[in-house]
Amino acid sequence: MTMITSKETQSIYGKQSSSDNLFTAKARKLQSLWRVQNGLEIGIGPERNSVDRNGQPTYYGNMIKDGESNGRNFFFPETFAYAQWRVNWQISYKFTAICCLLKVTY
């Protein structure tokens, strides 16, 4: 049995975040594996236009190219629809929390 080095892993599954805790790192690796198995192109993250200190785009293995617009970053279509609704109506978590505290419905 041959062990795969971290350099080989990165070339197959893409760069992984070095600041993740163990749980998050494992989750991101599973996302990377899923992306590779489904033949999806690696994306930039964590934001659409994220860059490193040299101004180069930051590609991470768990990010799917254009996933925020095509819905592939979401497991269920309903989750994607809800995320789109939140963005379209610009409802922030702070606003939602204030409404809950004040028992206001919207």
Image: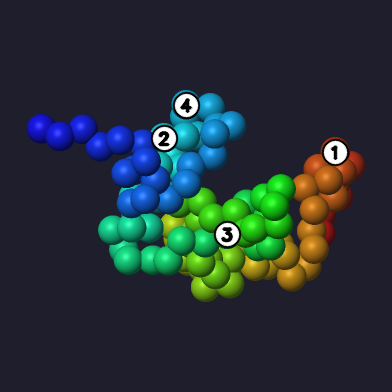
Question: Which mark is first along the chain, 4 or 1?
Answer: 4
Amino acid under label 4?
A: Leu
Q: Which mark is residue 44?
A: 3
Query: Residue 41, percent across and down?
Result: 42, 66
Q: Which residue is mark 1?
A: 101
Q: Which residue is mark 4?
A: 22
Query: Residue 61, percent across and down?
Result: 45, 51
In the picture provided, is 96 more to the left or to the right than 69?
right
User: Which quarter shows the C terminus?
Assistant: bottom right
Task: Name the mark nearer the viewer: 1 or 4.
Answer: 4
Eyeballing the image, is 17 above or below 72?
above
Distance between mark 1 and mark 4 Cα atoms: 34 Å
Residue at point 32%, 66% (across, down):
39
Q: Which residue is mark 2?
A: 26
Residue at point 15%, 34% (across, down):
2
Res 102 seen here: yes
Task: Name the mark nearer the viewer: 2 or 3.
Answer: 3
